[in-house]
Image (cartoon, helix red, strand yellow):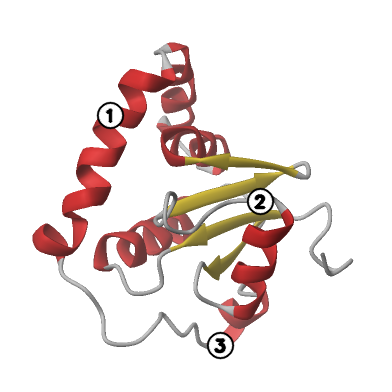
Amino acid sequence: MDSNLKNKTILLFDGYCNLCHSSVQFVLKHEKNNDLYFTSLQSPSGIEILNHYSINPKETDSLVLIEKNKAYIKSSAALRVSKYLKGLYPIAFGLLIIPSFIRNWVYDYVAKNRYKWYGKMDNCLVPDGNLLKRFL
């Protein structure tokens, strides 16, 4: 994996998903610091990261969080992102005590229906201005 990506906290998301796009916008608006970097699962850096961590994009196709050189998927990724947010959002991190098979059942249900409920973009999210440096 590219040495520029090591030791970064990276949120990978489905670049065509309206729900994922909205989630990234929410994180950018509410994060405490500018600790997170972003890339779509479909981008060259996203594919490189997935390959490095042996993550099958057919099994995990919505959110992946790379934190301290460890990959988290599905509900674990979503809940861990809450640590980086302002206000009361970090409380959601405590939901990790719920067994992952329960959390991931809910997560998978939403992920399976996200295009039907929220729609799909024709193109991946393209950041602008000073946000560009936070996207890989």
Q: Nearer the viewer, mark 3 or mark 1?
A: 1
Give the camera-side residue of 128 and 59.
Answer: 59
Q: Residues within 10 Å of mark 2 (few under 14, many from 20)?
A: few
Q: Residue at x 29, y 68 (%)?
A: 17
Q: Residue at x 46, y 85 (%)?
A: 126
Q: Nearer the viewer, mark 1 or mark 2?
A: 2
Mark 3–mark 2 Cα distance, whole angstroms, equals: 33 Å
Query: Residue 75 location, x and y as percent?
Result: 41, 34
Residue pointed to by mark 1: 105
Is residue 20 visible from the viewing direction of this image?
A: yes
Precedes in sequence: disc 3 or disc 2: 2
Secondary structure at numbered mark 1? helix
Tell me if residue 62 comes above or below residue 72 in the rendering.
below
Residue 35 placement: quadrant: bottom right
Q: Residue at x 53, y 54 (%)?
A: 56
Residue pointed to by mark 2: 54
Q: Are marks 3 and 1 in contact (CB under 8 Å)?
A: no
Q: Are marks 3 and 2 in contact (CB under 8 Å)?
A: no
Residue 87 placement: quadrant: top left
Query: Residue 127 location, x and y as percent?
Result: 49, 82
Mark 1–mark 2 Cα distance, whole angstroms, equals: 22 Å
Precedes in sequence: disc 1 or disc 2: 2
Q: Residues within 10 Å of mark 1 (few under 14, many from 20)?
A: few
Residue pointed to by mark 3: 129
Q: Residue furthest left?
A: 117
